[in-house]
Each structure stands twice: as structure tokens, then as C-alpha cells.
Image: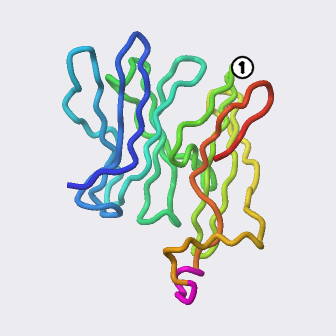
Amino acid sequence: PSSHASTIVELKGGGLMSAWFGGTAESKPDVAIWGSRRTAAEWSATTALALEPGVPCWNPVLFHTKDGRLWLYYKFGPSPQTWVAGRKYSDDEGKSWSAAEHLPAGLLGPIRAKPLVLKDGTIVSGTSFEAYRSWAVWIERSTDNGKTWAKIGPIEPPLNLDMETPAQDASSSESRQRNGIIQPSVVSLGGKHLRLY
């Protein structure tokens, strides 16, 4: 009944694959990662790509590494403050998937947006953490197709930046509970220049 945070990837040889998280409602324990493949004819039946027993899954990201492998990264846990990262790979463009692998604590992989895969194969992934009152972003970078990662950051807005929006009530304690930025996208500006949004 509820679905959110879709991702899509172009498959080698044509076609598309999409994934999203869905279940009875966001953060409910039955929420899994679902997917479908598109051929010239139609979208396939929806299938469960990742399910972590008793806890919800979140924010799938599909992308290819330079070696041609298709990856699915996702998060799982009761809330964004407790997320653990999971991932699977496919060597047949999403027809079948490896067993789930859980990343070490502190590494979350692409948090919502597809990472940038540079010409030399370096993966530059925007990631973030949503603590109770402080949000921040990092770059997670891999030069070996995701076997190992370096974490760079945190990247935070200036402390004096007014992050309130007009819709927020300045007197509300809820409006003052969160400061920071989350869920960055990384794009290339050409050459050695990258930008985070």
C-alpha cells in the first residue's frame, strides 16, 4: 500500500530496472526493497529484492561499477538514526542476485542518490547521517569497485546559516531539533571538479 524512494538504472543491452521500498507504511517492519525490469515489451512482475527480517528497509540505489556489475545498495533498521547498510550484486542485469552483505558499522553507501562512477572506476558516493539534532553529509569513496571505502567529511553548512523554512514555526521545539543537510547527490562538472547537491 505504500512505496517510496525509487531508483532506476539502464541495463546493458537495453531495458531498465527500477527498485523502491514498500510495505504497509514507511518504517513498518514489513517494508522490503522491491524491483521490476523493463524490456521492450513490458515491465516484469514486481519481486522482492531485499528483505531484512523484522525491520524495515529503506532507500535502494541501483548502479553499475566500472567492471559491469550491477549493484543494489539499501538501508535497514527501525529509523534513519539506526540504519545499517546492505548490498547485493547481480552479474546478469538483475535477473538474479547475490546473498545480502552488510557493510561495516559507520559505512552507509549511497544514501538515496546514485553515486558518481568516474572514468577510472572510482566510486564517489554521497552519504549522510540523521542524528537526533544534527544532520551531516560525507563522501564515501572507493577505488576498487566497492571492496574498500574511505569516508571523507563531515560536510556541514555554516553554523550561522538559517535553515528554517517559512512553513516552520520558529517557536516550535520540533523546528529547532534538526540542523544540517542530508542525502547528497554528486555530479561531475568536468575535469577534476565535482559538486554536491
Residue ID at (57%, 24%): 65
Camera-side residue of 164 and 125: 164
Q: Which residue in the rendered view is the most extreme toward the right?
A: 192
Residue 52 location, x and y as percent? 36, 51
Looking at the rendering, in which quadrant would you find the N terminus? bottom left
Up/down of 101 relative to 158, above or below: above
Q: Which residue in the rendered view is the most extreme toward the bottom?
A: 171
Task: Describe the element under mark 1 as helix, strand or loop.
Answer: loop
User: Dot 1: few (<14), some (14–19), or many (≥20) neighbours within 10 Å?
Assistant: few
| Colouring style | rainbow
Residue ID at (25%, 55%): 2
Q: In this view, does 190 lie to the left or right of 7?
A: right
Up/down of 80 relative to 12, above or below: below
Camera-side residue of 26 and 190: 190
Q: In this view, does 163 lie to the left or right of 8?
A: right
Which of the 4 image quarters holds residue 133?
bottom right
Up/down of 153 relative to 117, above or below: below
Residue ID at (68%, 72%): 162
Camera-side residue of 186 and 25: 186
Residue 87 location, x and y as percent? 48, 40
Q: Name the residue under label 1.
A: 120
Up/down of 182 relative to 97, above or below: below
Residue 66 location, x and y as percent? 60, 19
The amino acid type, in three-letter code, at marker 1 is Asp
Q: Which residue in the rendered view is the most extreme toward the front?
A: 166
Residue ID at (44%, 19%): 91
Residue 95 location, x and y as percent? 32, 22
Q: Is 9 part of what is drawn in magenta?
A: no
Q: In this view, does 47 lie to the left or right of 186?
A: left
Q: What stretch is highlighted in magenta?
A: 170-176
Number of residue marks: 1
Which of the 4 image quarters holds residue 41?
top left
